[in-house]
Amino acid sequence: RKEVEQDPGPFNVPEGATVAFNCTYSNSASQSFFWYRQDCRKEPKLLMSVYSSGNEDGRFTAQLNRASQYISLLIRDSKLSDSATYLCVVTGNSGYALNFGKGTSLLVTP
Amino acid sequence: NAGVTQTPKFQVLKTGQSMTLQCAQDMNHNSMYWYRQDPGMGLRLIYYSASEGTTDKGEVPNGYNVSRLNKREFSLRLESAAPSQTSVYFCASSESTGATEAFFGQGTRLTVV
């Protein structure tokens, strides 16, 4: 079983919609959690870290549920520029592991 | 600010040829990584270097070697390229392993024919 699982999508949503992505991880000892964004044919870039208490950055809200071992990302008022692949990233107790999910593709349409 | 710089950006190799992918970072980061990204497979870790002088295998190390030349530079070598190594290769660095943000280079698109 892959350590980090994501629904690949694609999620096609109209501008202004709210969309949510979930991600599950298998290693209960995982310590840190992130969402990265990757545009087509570009490198991944950090979108936001995910904290135990949940955190918000503008239109983006990330939440962590350690008991159920999942992470979520909520995007409100979607913009065309939000179209990208969103990568769930989890670190574990192996020391190095930035374990990436396969990504969820989002397409925001006019 | 350069960040993480990879060279080359594109490369075509014939099966059996060798080549080295170069990576340099100017952020004084301790840890560096090499990933490959294939359609439907996501990013997979090939090798990493937690700190200068150390290297360790990741998820898919077979067919590759690495050198942490100094704190700034981390190279990836394909000794005898195979078509299965056709991929996009990303170098990344972070302040330390684990809990910190990783910064990625722009990637190297490698085709082995």
Image (spheres, grey):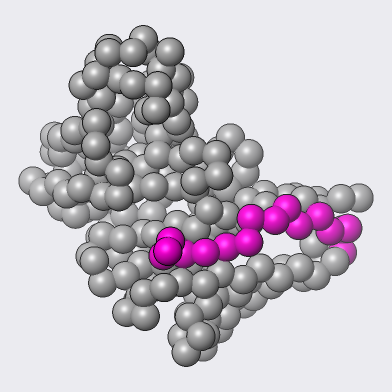
Residue lying at 23% horizontally and 27% vertically, measured from the top left = B77
Residue B62 at x, y = what percent?
A: 24, 37
Q: Is residue A13 magenta?
A: yes
Q: Which portion, as a residue range, is magenta?
A: A1-16
Q: Name the quadrant containing residue B65.
A: top left
Residue A32 at x, y = what percent?
A: 39, 73
Q: Name the quadrant containing residue A29.
A: bottom left
Q: Is residue B71 visible?
A: yes
Q: Name the quadrant containing residue A78.
A: bottom right
Residue that sits furthest to the left in the current view: B53
Decide: is A85 above or below B12: below
Residue B36 at x, y = what percent?
A: 40, 39
Residue lying at 50% horizontally and 58% vertically, measured from the top left = A101
Which is more toward the observer, B18 or B29? B18
Residue lying at 30% horizontally and 44% vertically, measured from the top left = B60
Residue that sits furthest to the front in the current view: A1
Q: Please identify the quadrant where the N terminus of chain A is shown.
A: bottom left
Which is more toward the observer, A45 or B67? B67
Residue that sits furthest to the right in the current view: A110
Q: Is residue B28 magenta?
A: no
Q: Is residue B9 visible?
A: no
